[in-house]
Amino acid sequence: MKLVCLLRGINVGGKNPVKMATLKDKMTEAGFDNVVTYLNSGNVIFDSAINEKDATLKIQNILVNDFKVEALVAVFSAEDISETGQHIPDWWGTDDKTVKHNAIFILPPTTVDEVIEDIGQHIPEYEQVDSYGQVVFWTANIKTFSRTKWSKLVGSKFYSRVTIRNSNTFKKIVQIISK
């Protein structure tokens, strides 16, 4: 089964350093196949005979034992990520440089509905929000970013239960999966 691992909080400002090439090697040694990493921000695509939950635990152990890093590990089926990629809103991920496009992955057992309820209704004049599966698609103008509801996610009780990728990264992950 093809899986996607998204690591949260690694290689940020010199904290929680994880070399992707070394992680790839350690994951291969641990029995994962066809391991591919993308960028330094913790995006890993791989094949596994074990399910998402067991893969999550195995990768957490690799991070702790081999890197001395405790990071949030989110593992999704490639099928779920690919299907989510087919439901990207038309307005999300455009080449418009005046806006930010983020894919906010909500980590189980937390649900999208819980996070949306906590953040509150988005403000249409400043941001656009849609969701599919465990992902919230969010677009906001850079100039009015601080006026958006979803910019408050950082201070919310659910911030530790999300990991965020920009549109280019999300689209590249979907592209890698489809190969």
Image: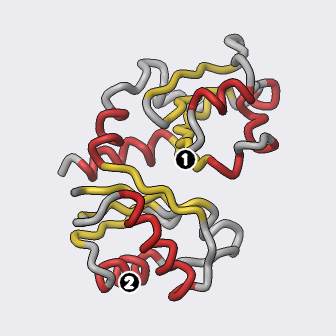
Q: Which residue is mark 2?
A: 26
Whole-percent x, y for residue 123 in the image:
72, 15
| Residue 107 percent coordinates (x, y) | 55, 47
- The residue that mark 1 highlights is 107
Could you tell me which residue is drawn at 31 percent across and 56 percent down?
3
Q: CA distance from mark 1 to mark 2?
A: 24 Å
Q: Earlier in the sequence, mark 1 or mark 2?
A: 2
As shown in the figure, which amino acid type bears the numbered disc 1?
Leu
Which kind of residue does numbered mark 2 sit on?
Lys
Q: Residue at x 53, y 27 (%)?
A: 96
Residue at 44 percent of width and 43 percent of height:
168
Q: Residues within 10 Å of mark 2 (few under 14, many from 20)?
A: some
Mark number, residue 59: none
In this view, the residue in front, 157 or 97, is 157
**In the depicted structure, whether residue 38 falls above or below residue 117:** below
The answer to whether the residue labelled 1 contacts the one labelled 2, judged by CB atoms less than 8 Å apart, is no
